[in-house]
Image: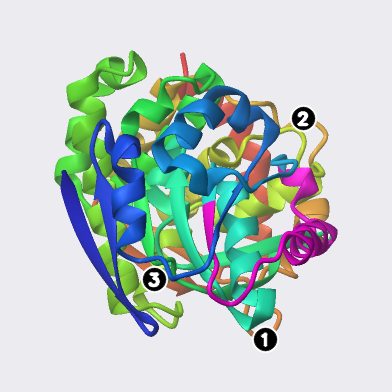
Amino acid sequence: MVTIQIRSSMGTYDVRFARGALAQARRLIASVSGPGELFVLSSPRVWKFWGRDVTHALGASSRKVILFDDRESAKRLITIEDIARKLARGGADRHCTLIAVGGGVVGDVAGFVAATYLRGVRIVHIPTTVVAQVDSAIGGKTGVDLPEGKNLVGAFYPPKLVIADPEMLRTLPQREYRSGLYEVIKYGIIADAKLFRFLETQMDAILRRDRAAVDWIIPRCMAIKARVVTADERESGLRKILNFGHTLGHALEAATAYKRFRHGEAIAWGMMAATLLGLATRRTNEADALRILRLIARVGPLPSLAGINAAQLRVVVSSDKKNRGGQARWVLAREISKAEWDVQIPWKLVARTLAELPRIAARTMR
């Protein structure tokens, strides 16, 4: 079993990665949980596939289960209130431990509940998607969306443990699986040239869910995330590189009411736009830009940008939580494995890039 340790302001916690790790969940959780009860937070569609296995793995302690809608459009404060009330009615006290079983939405919502219920209770993540395993379950970011933008209400609240079992990815629909691979590509672009080269040579195997390939890329991404968030827990500097592609990606999600794009798909468009902006501002060289665009294209087709205009996106970007003084801050690639954050770009250049993006993407994806 791969163990990756992360230091946070609230203590050190482990990320455990292995095939079959779910079967060891009871023992692993017992080492970090308190004397209180366990409450499992998940969604109906995740529980349909994994409820029996999770129940078996946790034993009698998993009888208290709260299911909620894990669509991005349901990631709202009203969901937090509903879960908190169910915890209160279920007798959850300050010694309880929440077990989040699901993808990024489940983790974000459960994490925010844990941060705020009784002013903070323990949480353990069991991520079931690629995005959650390589990214969102690690680092302690929690939150929900507002109509004005994504993750505008939240807290930094690290878990006590993350248990990642790649066997749990086998029930993912192919579109959901592919969506997560864009976040894997992000890690190669911002921090790991060897990972990027591996993705270039092994993408066909990864798309087939080859065990050896998947088991190589996921812990490598986890280790990158661990290094970054240990060095910069509250996103005051280095952690901002993790937002590569996210300024525009989050705007695309919000502008389409979180219904057109999977998260990773929106990030893919955002990474392509950031790559073109890097090229236009002479921060990213042409050879690296072409490699990035081609690798993103190999993952598969993306939902169209039709009907989305730059003026519409500008309104959403202006409320992005990463802004400073009302000005958007962009993350751009200096080269593959190195990124620069807090870059200011004139909106005219952004708008021109957005106008050209569908045409350039179509040429790259041939």
Tell me: 159 left or right of 227: right
Image location of residue 17, percent across then percent down: 25, 44
Q: Residue at x 20, y 41 (%)?
A: 195
Depth check: give the residue in front, 175 or 111: 111
Q: Amino acid at mark 1?
A: Gly
Q: Amino acid at mark 3?
A: Arg
Q: Residue at x 22, y 65 (%)?
A: 5
Residue 346 can be seen, yes or no: no
**Quarter the N terminus occupies:** top left
Image location of residue 198, percent across then percent down: 18, 32
Query: Which residue is labeled 1 in the image?
Result: 325
Query: Which residue is labeled 2 in the image?
Result: 306
First in residue order: circle 3 vs circle 1: 3
**Magenta includes 77?**
yes
**Magenta includes 313?**
no
State yes or no: discs 3 and 1 in contact (Cβ < 8 Å).
Answer: no
Query: Which residue is labeled 3 in the image?
Result: 239
Marks 3 and 2 sit apart, C-alpha to C-alpha, by 32 Å
Number of residue marks: 3
First in residue order: circle 1 vs circle 2: 2
Q: Which segment is the magenta one?
A: 72-99
Depth check: give the residue in front, 187 or 220: 220
Dot 1, crowdedness within 10 Å: few (<14), some or many (≥20)? few
Q: Secondary structure at mark 3?
A: helix
